[in-house]
Image (spheres, helix red, strand yellow):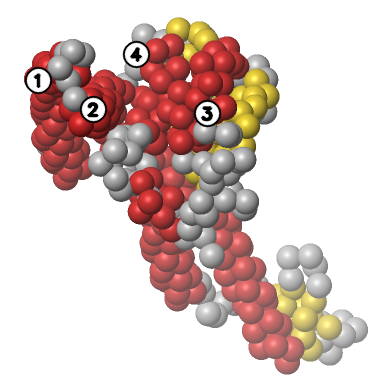
């Protein structure tokens, strides 16, 4: 059962208290009016001589009503009691009816006013909630956003200021971490480049023995992996910044280009690589989006088995968002291990080798690039083994997308 919102509950409390108070006032008024109504009274008495002539006339006393009706004196008590009862009933009924109508009208107005007042009071809380939701949806990409609530000091403003302080500290922490990764990666590139040059010089000497050449090839492979790791760290640090300057681009063009570049690698791995590039316009950084697609295709090829397949599909959804989906065969992956594949340096057990082709950053970069563009990357197990990775990105800038499906 869906719980009522705080605004609705406050409105019901306001309206309920008003109605209870109104009922108490109405009841007290009813009792006071009842006590003030007359409980007795009289009527005009007329005297009339009845009989032939004044000598034999008799006195007859009767009551004459306002409409001229004459009531014998013996029936006066019953008539008076009846009249008093009718007057009291009519007065009390009128008082209750009119009071109830007035209470209903004023109560409805009080509930409406309570709804407006509750909305006004809760508006700062809604602002805090909306900001927190945007930050949570954008992960650390939206930590620069603040509530910045203005106005007099009160409990809600104190909560908003505390939230801003917490977000500011998190923003500084994440920014420092990104700077550290970027600076460390830049510093590590120089010794790796020097190591590659020294190994290649030693291998190309005329006096180099087969053992030296074999050792050099192994060292070059390890060095190459370290270079890919550093490149991935730099790209990961860059992709964790929100993309502000967006260019309109079609994911179909990127997918076609990446697949064409990966055909030789797929053929060498005995993997059938196909594409179904439908229009999928979006907006963002072309270099980062190309890297996203390249990582998806490389993972689909490298984490496959001979004779398997990898397919790339792009399309535009009914909500106007762009989708790129890569499906591949390969080892069976349990569903509970899929979330960990998007974390840096996480691989399957069979890939935990020093000479592995991947650096363990492929899907991490994919998710970071997707989130930097306001999208998301998800994965699910392929029933035949392998993965189905789907990246969803917003439509192109400057266009209004249709309603998102619920």
Label 2 – label 3 distance at C-alpha:
26 Å
The residue under the point 50% across, 8% down is 248
How many numbered discs sit on the rendered protein?
4
Please report whichever mark, 3 or 4, sits nearer to the chain's N-terminal start. 4
Q: Give yes or no for contact between labels 4 and 2 (Cβ–Cβ under 8 Å).
A: no
What distance separates the C-alpha of mark 2 from that of mark 1? 26 Å
Q: Of the two numbered discs 4 and 2 on the same chain, state the one appearing first in sequence.
A: 2
Farthest residue to the right: give it: 52
Is label 2 in contact with label 1 (beta carbons under 8 Å)?
Answer: no
Q: Quadrant of the N terminus?
A: bottom right
* C-alpha separation, residue under disc 4 versus residue under disc 1: 34 Å
Q: Is residue 120 above or below residue 382?
A: above
Q: Who's the residue at 52% across and 54% down the image? A: 332
The crowding category of the residue bearing disc 1, from other C-alpha atoms within 10 Å (few below 14, some 14 to 19, many at least 20), is few
- Bin the neighbour count of mark 3 within 10 Å (Cα to Cα): few under 14, some 14-19, many 20 and up: few
**Label 4 or label 1, whichever comes before in sequence order:** 1
Report crowding for label 4: few under 14, some 14 to 19, many 20 or more residues within 10 A (C-alpha). Answer: few
Q: Residue 320's image quarter? A: top right
Mark in front: 4 vs 2: 2
Would you name the residue on which mark 2 appears? 210
Which residue sits at x=49%, y=54%? 333
Element class at badge 3: helix
The residue that mark 1 highlights is: 191
Q: Nearer the viewer, mark 3 or mark 4?
A: 3
Q: Which mark, residue 268?
A: 3
Secondary structure of residue under mark 4:
loop
Element assignment for label 2: helix
Tag 4 residue: 244
Which comes sooner in the sequence, label 2 or label 1?
Answer: 1
């Amino acid at each position: 059962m869906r719980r009522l919102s705080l605004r609705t509950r406050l409105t019901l409390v306001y309206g309920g208290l008003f109605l209870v108070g109104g009922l108490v006032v109405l009841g007290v008024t009813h009792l006071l009016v009842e006590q003030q109504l007359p409980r007795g009274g009289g009527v005009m008495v007329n005297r009339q001589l009845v009989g032939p002539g004044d000598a034999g006339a008799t006195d007859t006393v009767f009551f004459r009503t306002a409409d001229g009706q004459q009531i014998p004196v013996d029936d006066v008590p019953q008539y008076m009691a009846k009249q008093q009862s009718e007057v009291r009933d009519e007065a009390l009924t009128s008082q209750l009816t009119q009071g109830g109508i007035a209470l209903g009208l004023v109560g409805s107005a009080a509930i409406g006013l309570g709804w407006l007042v509750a909305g006004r009071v809760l508006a700062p809380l809604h602002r805090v909630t909306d900001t927190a939701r945007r930050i949570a949806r954008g992960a650390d990409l939206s930590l620069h956003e603040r509530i910045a609530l203005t106005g007099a000091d009160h409990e809600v403003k104190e909560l908003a200021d505390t939230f801003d302080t917490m977000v500011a500290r998190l923003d500084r922490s994440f920014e420092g971490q990104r700077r550290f990764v970027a600076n460390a990666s830049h510093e590590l590139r120089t010794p790796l480049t020097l190591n590659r040059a020294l190994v290649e010089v030693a291998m190309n000497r005329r006096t180099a023995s087969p053992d030296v050449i074999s050792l050099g090839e192994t060292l070059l492979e390890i060095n190459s992996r370290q270079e890919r790791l550093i490149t991935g760290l730099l790209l990961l640090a860059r992709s964790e910044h929100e993309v502000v300057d967006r260019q309109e681009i079609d994911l179909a063009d990127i997918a076609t280009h990446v697949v064409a570049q990966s055909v030789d690698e797929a053929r060498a791995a005995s993997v059938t690589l196909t594409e179904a590039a439908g229009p999928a316009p979006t907006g963002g950084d072309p270099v980062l989006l190309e890297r996203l697609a390249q990582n998806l295709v490389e993972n689909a090829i490298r984490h496959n088995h001979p004779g398997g397949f990898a397919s790339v599909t792009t399309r535009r959804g009914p909500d106007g968002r762009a989708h790129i989906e890569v499906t591949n065969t390969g080892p069976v992956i349990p569903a509970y291990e899929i979330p960990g594949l998007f974390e840096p340096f996480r691989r399957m057990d069979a890939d935990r080798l020093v000479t592995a082709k991947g650096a363990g950053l492929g899907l991490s970069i994919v998710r970071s690039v997707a989130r930097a563009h306001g999208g998301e990357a998800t994965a699910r197990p392929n029933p035949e083994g392998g993965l189905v990775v789907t990246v969803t990105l917003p439509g192109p800038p400057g266009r209004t997308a249709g309603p998102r499906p619920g």
